[in-house]
Image (tube, coloured by chain):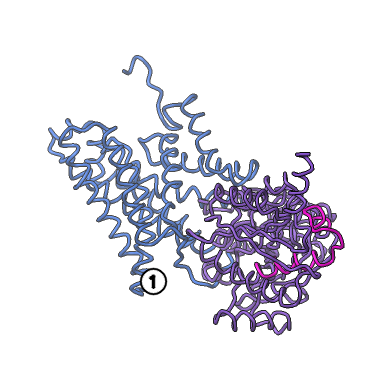
Amino acid sequence: MNQLVANAAISAAIILLVGVGFALIYRVGRFFHFAHGAAFTAGAYMNLVFFRVFGLPQPLSATLSVLTCIALGCTMELAVYRPLRKRSASGVVQLVASLGLYILLTSLISLAFGDQTESVRSATIAKGVSVAGARLTDIQITIIACAAVAASMVAWALRYTKAGREFRAVASDPELAAITGVRSDRVILGAFAVGSGLAGIAGILVSLDVDMRPTMGLLPLLSAVVAVLVGGVGRVLGLVMGAILIASAQNVGGWYLGQQWREPVVFVVLLGFLFVRPEGVMGKKLTKATV
Amino acid sequence: MVAVVIAMIVAIGQGHDDELRIGVVFPLTGDAASYGEKGREAIDLAVSIVNAEGGCGGRPVRVIYEDSRADPKTGVSAIRKLISADHVPIVIGDIVSAVTLAAAPIAENNRVVLLSPTSSSPAITNAGHYIYRIWPSDLAEGRAIAKLALSRDYRRVSIFHMNNDYGTSIAQVFKKTFEAGGGSIPVMEAYQAEGTDYRSFLAKMKMDAPDALYIAGYFADTATIVRQLRELGLSTQVLGTTAVEDDKFLQLAGDAAEGVIYPLATGFDPASSDAQVQQFVKKFRSRYGHEPGWVEAQAYDAFMLICHVASRLDEDVTGEALKKALDTMGSYKGVAGVIEFDENGDVVKPVVLKTVRNGVFSRLAGSE
């Protein structure tokens, strides 16, 4: 049973790492950036290139890969989303564009590397360390630690730094923010940089844990989207709770219903929330008086 | 009067002259033509050997080839022609499963034996009473590994299978065989091909602690599952499929590949020291100037098997007589291994059990 909790913690950490970036971009960009999943996959494959093709040591290789992901995210914003925004494209148009980008990028990866599973792990199996009766490998502990650090840092930065205040200003009202001198384009670009970097980190860590395939980004992305919707977009804490809820649903569902139900369960949870609490776990119910 | 004439024509057509006619449907043109040509070379060689020795039990043999182009529709007209115009009691074919399956109902309805040298689709098992093959069904491996589990006195084996035709059907066969032998299956679950996180299932292994885990899938997913299993600190014995024998499996699974047991159907080994195999290889090489491969060996065996059972028939060689002879023949030793049929006309070939030892695919000690 402890293993079940540990497994859920790993899943939650991955969802959180992907979800934080997705939520940052969603709050200021106001659209679903599905190509976020491609940044995740790109992180894993760039690490494959730097580590195996160029033979760089793993820490350096991972750092370069994350930087590439940041560049990729910024390029998507500058080359696709910003021009669309300037032409007043709606959120739906940007969503379709992001789906197109996702398909384009994953197809490029599969053309370059093939559809088969690739691995950067060593041949030696590290038996996990025992934590309260559950086994966790070093890389799995790293995933959980990274997610915790990333989520706390983002939460702290949003609250206490100037960039965070500007971000919240653009998120709540771009026009009002512009009047007070906040340049929303720069804020959105920053969100893409941070978000894509986090997605890249998640992709690299996941590939170090369970190998990589060109389609690896889709399931974590969809789980993260559901966690964002369930947790409410406003707060990092809500997202943390959303991620834990989705990860628990996946693992408990997988336990009782069978492995193949892991993913469907996520969407059952989403449907349930849309019916019962569309504003999310942390959302405030708007009463008529406050509207 | 007309009836008598027709009866006479049919009687003549069915070859009351002592000649044995064998129809062959192979892809002689098209994408799979190279397989068909290989098969034809082997059968031509076999015919010349047999006829030089006086035929099959005194009956000279004549082979009539028809081209299927590896296309089911063409294959159907080919077998129709062989049955209605050439009145053959037996057809060897096809190389590819799709044509064998399409031709099967026609052979069945006309009570003509259809013997495929190489078709592996599980659907052929139930394609008809007159349908035989000397290539094991994909399902044979599921049965073989279940028998190994029983012979090792495993009482409880969990199954984790890929959610596709291959994984599901061999998992079912494993379950059936294992339970019939007194074993039990604590957990049987499917996984999606595109998943990477198998821990929900593997956590159960920790609780249930079965004697072994049977993973019915391809090499990449098996590698990831085995790896996650070992990372969880479990040393459960892993049983795999034939698909495991791939160098990529060793690379992906790393140390975790060590000790995985999987079945492999025995086949043609040109380097074998067996006299029968050596003679076949020598004759083939001197006639064609190159080495025979597994297609040649299977086609050769198919022909020689028919000749073997036909030569033991005292009565006329009809489809019914051949079927009866095949059902009761016991075992026949060919160049690609011993052939024995089960009640469905599937070949029961000895399966060797292999394992990964020190990073190399090796014979499992103690298996025949």
Is B310 one of the magenta-colored residues?
yes
Q: Nearer the viewer, residue A187 or A223?
A: A223
Query: Which of the two residues, B367 or A129, is positioned nearer the viewer here?
Result: B367
Would residue A6 appear left or right of B346 to someone viewing this image? left
Residue shown at 58%/57% (left/top)? B66
By secondary structure, the bulk of the magenta-drawn segment is best described as helix
Rendered blue, the chain in question is A
User: How crowded is the residue under tag 1: few (<14 C-alpha within 10 Å), some, or many (20+)?
Assistant: some
The residue at 55%/40% (across/down) is A249
Image spot of residue B49 (x, y percent): 69, 76
Q: Which chain is purple?
A: B
In the drawing, does residue B85 fall left or right of residue A40? right
Up/down of B265 relative to A279, above or below: below
- Which region shows up in magenta? B299-324
Locate residue B22, reporting x and y percent.
69, 61
Q: Quadrant of the N terminus of chain B?
A: top right
Q: Is residue A288 above or below residue B162?
A: above
What residue sits 48% from the left and 59% below the top? B31
Asked if residue B72 can be seen in this view, the reply is yes
Can you give x and y, in whole percent of width and height, for residue B318 in the image?
79, 55
Residue at image point 31% right, 18% down: A291
Question: Would you place residue B281 above or below residue B308 in this image?
Answer: below
Query: The disc numbered 1 marks a residue on which chain?
Result: A
